[in-house]
Image (cartoon, rainbow, N blue to C red):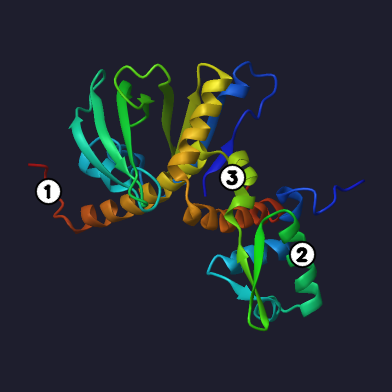
Amino acid sequence: MATTSSGGEPEHATADREIVMSRVISAPRELVFEAFTQVRHLSGWWGPEGFTTTTRSFEFRVGGAWDFVMHGPDGTDYQEWITWREIVPPERITLLHGESRDDPNAFESVLAFEPAGDETRIVMHTVFPTKELRDEAVEKYHAIEGGEQTLRNLAAYVAELTRNETTPKGAES
Amino acid sequence: MARAATTSDAFNAIAEPQRREILVLLRGGERPVTELARDLGMSQPQASKHLRVLREVGLVRVRGAGKQRLYDLDAHGLRPVHEWLGGFERFWSGSFDRLDEYVQDLKQERREEPPDGDDQ
């Protein structure tokens, strides 16, 4: 399960407009990194359960872009456009994520891949230009995820989340 | 320490583990209180009490079907919880689930390839 903290550090100036998530994937980091580098890989996992993607163009290099459409399980299409700002194999990827090339509300995410024994910890740090844009992104992805099924799944997710909080095992650093 | 009423909002309502269990059971579709009570190993009045709390905060709804009253998950009531968790986080959490599965397949593929098998 991904651990999430949104605005966890009150003294931090960007706390109300950033989202930090981390997740441990049980594979070596070269392999995890590779899953981010090719469109045949990305289209195999991008988006939550039930989503598929159709790629218009893809160029994995600094300044290159991935122009694609995300298809939701309810048939809704979402335009997505990603450009890479920094690629440091197998350590770090910085990307700009928006709906189109000139999306003024695009936001930057830094994905760090850290070795953790035989596994890899991905730490994703996203800072939005303003708190309003953060809230908008949360709303947008809320909409993308919308639908009865997602909310049904959420009931289980929330239950698990709360259960994990009460019975800590292998506390996250 | 003073506690907020369980019926004040969805967060307080789902703070109770058995009520979360009820929500999980209802994911599969609507159920009568008798079945819920049986599956949770509680008395029917206990289950009804929990269901009343969940109804008051809009997490479940009920409809009469003949003699039975069927309870169903009301996704609308989860909206505040969902918003609190954040769509963006949920999006990535789902993607990371799929990434994990995908990478496991990739790992398996690589294991099956001959050791000198290079990319073409």
Label 2 is found on which chain of the structure? B
**Callout in the foreground (2, 3):** 2
CB under 8 Å between discs 2 and 3 = no
Q: Are marks 2 and 3 on the same chain?
A: yes
Residue located beneath label 3 in the image: B82
Relative height, residue A65 to residue B100 (above, below): above
Label 3 is found on which chain of the structure? B
Please tell me which residue lies in front, B84 or B103.
B84
Which residue is depicted at the point 19% across and 33% down?
A56
Quadrant position of the C terminus of chain B in the picture: top left
Percent x, y of residue A125 = 49, 28
Relative height, residue A102 to residue A56 (above, below): above
Which numbered disc, 2 or 3, marks the residue that appears first in the sequence?
Answer: 2
Which residue is depicted at the point 38% across and 50% down?
B98
Residue B116 circle label: 1
Residue located beneath label 2 in the image: B52
Q: Report crowding for label 1: few under 14, some 14 to 19, many 20 or more residues within 10 A (C-alpha).
A: few
Q: Is residue A130 left or right of residue B67?
A: left
Q: Report crowding for label 3: few under 14, some 14 to 19, many 20 or more residues within 10 A (C-alpha).
A: many
Percent x, y of residue A31 = 30, 43
Please tell me which residue lies in front, A66 or B119.
A66
Which amino acid lies under the numbered mark 3 shown in the image of this protein? His
* Mark pair 2, 1: CA separation: 64 Å
Residue furthest toward the right?
B1
Which numbered disc, 3 or 1, marks the residue that appears first in the sequence?
Answer: 3
Which amino acid lies under the numbered mark 1 shown in the image of this protein? Asp
Percent x, y of residue B10 = 71, 50
Q: Is residue A17 left or right of residue A56?
A: right
Residue furthest toward the left?
B120
Percent x, y of residue A115 = 43, 38
